[in-house]
Structure formats: C-alpha cells, structure tokens
Image: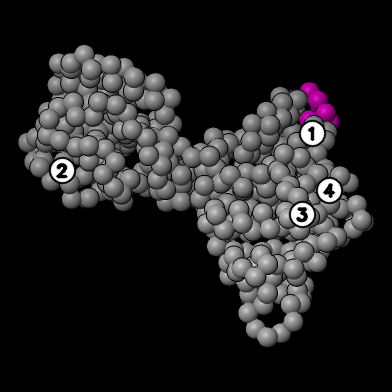
Amino acid sequence: IGVVRLVGPRAETIARTVFQTAGPEETTLCRDKLHYGAFVAGNVVIDDVVCSAIRLHGNIAVDICAHGGVRIIERILSELDSLGATVATNSTTESPCWPVDDLIQHEAAIAMSAARTERAVRFLSRQYTELPQMITETADMAEADPSRTRDRLSAMAGRTDAAYRLIGGATVAFVGPANAGKSTLFNRLVGRRAAVVSPTCGTTRDWIREPVEILGVAVYLIDTAGVHADPGALETTAIADAQRHITTANLRIIVLDAATELAPHTAEAVQTWMNLGSYLVVHNKTDLSTPNTAIRPPFATENTVATSALSGAGLDRLGAAIVEELGITDEIENQPALFTPRQANLVGKAIVLLDSQAETASSLLCRDLLGKLTASTDNSNPQDAPNRH
C-alpha cells in the first residue's frame, strides 16, 4: 500500500473534498475510525482507499491508504497539491508528519521511509519506541555505575554494522573457479535467469548485480567472472574489474565444485578470498560428488554449505547462512541497537569519557545523542501548523 498523511488545520477539509465513502452515508471522517471509499479528483475516481483521522501534535491528521503504485500516489499528491497542500520532506526535524520527540525517533522515521523490507521496518519501529528510553536509562546510571553503563553502550554499538545492513541492504559477491556453478546458483537465488550459464569456461565476462530479499533482508547479489589457469585477455580484464566488488562486499560466497579436486592456483585464490573478511564456502554440484571426489579441508569448515544449484538442494540452508554471517539475528531485531553513524560516533565518545568524566558522558548522551525535539515539533496552535502531505 501507499500511505499519504495530511497534516494541518485544513487537513479534514481537504480530505472531505477528495474522499467519497462507499456507502450512502455522509462523508464524515470520525476520529480513530477507518472509512472505506474512493479518492476522487473532480468526477474521476483515482483509487479505492481507506481513510482515517487521528490527532497529531494537537491537530487532526488524515491518513489516506491507497494502492502502492507509483502513478496512483503521484496522482493523489498532485490533486492534494492543487487543493492547497504542500509536500513535506524528511530533511528537517520540524516536519509535523511524524510525531518525534528526539533525534533518535527522527532518524528512525527517516530510515523507515528508505527501508527495503518489512523486517527492517519492524526493527526501526522497535528502535523508535525503545532506544530513546534505553539511552535515557543508561545516561542516568553513568555516574553511579560506569562499568555497567559501558557494557550497555558497547552492546548497542556492537549491533551497529548489522543494523546498517538490515536497513540499507548488504552486498554478497559470488566468487570461485570457472564452471563451479556460480552463475547457476546466482540465478537460483535471484529467481530468474539473470546470468548466462554454459559448460564453457569463462562464460561470465562481466560482473552482474541483482537485488533479492533473503529472510527479510535486502541483499545485492554480485556474480563475478570465474578464475581458471589460462584466462584470455578479456577474461583477465573481467576478473580484475570484479576484484573491487569482491574486496568491498560485506560477504563473499566462495563456490567450489564438490565433484572436482581444486587446482593449486584455485586453492591460492580461495585462501585470498577468505583473508578479505566474512565468507561462506559453498560445495556446489553435490548431486555429482562422491566420497572420493568431495572437497576436503582446509576448505570444509564451519562456514561450509553443501548445495546443488541444479536441483535446488541446500538453498534454504545457504540463505539462512548468508543472513547469519551478515550478523542479522533475532537479537538484532529484538534489542536496542545504534543504526546511524551519528549515533555510533557519539556513543563511542561517551564510552571513552566514562573512565574519567562520567558526568560529561551522561550529558553527551542526553543532550547530543537524544537531543529532545518536543519544543520544535509540537504544533499545539493549529494556526501555526502548515498543510502538508
């Protein structure tokens, strides 16, 4: 769905102009009640919608819930604009469209508008509600119990990288020798034939990037050219070009053919990829492997997943392993976590100050990290509140 919120002294008046109830009753927007009907522009029905009127910052706001098609929302916004409403953005904390009391709630509201999955929205909703309270409680104990305060702040900071990935998505690069089945596995996870596959070595000549959702996490999969002993000039260029994606990816999926022994140059490449950071080793083509041909240690580690890209075996386990290796666990979703660089930077400073300046650390958490905004966002006088949507 797409939700448009009207805020301001003329919100109800404008809403009654564009909303027609589905029944014969008069178009009256009762507060805290859902109304089904149609959004109209003149005599033209734009979409079936659900409207609700709520009290927000001392004013009445109206939420218009329509279908989420871009064109539908554009037409709704255009009609509201023609009736005197103006578009509000998330660029200022004074926007009355979200009831925020502090900077953390403001950052959560902004992040929600860019979140790519339902799981990310749930995470941000929890931070919107619980993180400010946790920061307040932690700041209150800073002088009396610096050690416990440090533990709390460190725990929140330790979840920051995973929070970034949950909100903004993570990059996962597929690497490995030629003909290990990288592109077939890539296509399986994407859900369509995004990469060309062939028994011929060096089929993948350039990197390919596709967005997917795995267990509620936005992931950008990158397929790269396979490594082999005798690449041509074009393949060498493709391998070199893919290197920056491999190096900067949040996670590397090292795909190996479980039915073929590793060549020495491939073993060296695998070790190099492992040294770059987080990785998973995938023993692919398990439908063809036997106990005599299966890959053996050192690449059979706890970070190993067995799959068959051809049959789809092991893909569920691979998806779960990817999310787990990215650090996105139930703990991240259910615990207070820092989710912006500003928050992480200020908490880092507070942790340093705890040893010798606990009072200053407490003040920094309250004044700078929370930054109460109640005075600037509470438009208690309806005449001072602009019409926005």
Tell me whether circle 4 and circle 1 mark residues in contact (CB < 8 Å). no
Give how far apart the Cα atoms at labels 4 and 1 are.
17 Å
Q: Amino acid at mark 3?
A: Ala
Looking at the rendering, the stretch of residues picked out in magenta corresponds to 355-361
Q: Nearer the viewer, mark 4 or mark 2?
A: 4
> Label 3 belongs to which residue?
85
Looking at the rendered structure, the secondary structure element under dot 4 is helix
Give me the disc on residue 219: none
Give how far apart the Cα atoms at labels 2 and 1 are.
55 Å
First in sequence: mark 3 or mark 4?
Answer: 3
Establish if 248 lies above or below 319: above
Label 1 crowd bin: few (<14), some (14–19), many (20+), radius 10 Å: some
Report if residue 128 lies within the magenta region: no
299 with respect to 120 (left or right)? left
First in sequence: mark 2 or mark 3?
Answer: 3
Give how far apart the Cα atoms at labels 2 and 3 are.
61 Å
Looking at this view, is 124 or 87 the one in front?
A: 87
Give how far apart the Cα atoms at labels 4 and 2 are.
59 Å
Label 2 crowd bin: few (<14), some (14–19), many (20+), radius 10 Å: many
> Label 2 belongs to which residue?
286
Q: Amino acid at mark 4?
A: Thr
Q: Nearer the viewer, mark 4 or mark 1?
A: 4
Tell me whether circle 1 and circle 3 mark residues in contact (CB < 8 Å). no
First in sequence: mark 1 or mark 3?
Answer: 3
> Label 4 belongs to which residue?
377
First in sequence: mark 4 or mark 1?
Answer: 1
Looking at the rendered structure, the secondary structure element under dot 2 is loop
The quarter holding residue 360 reads top right
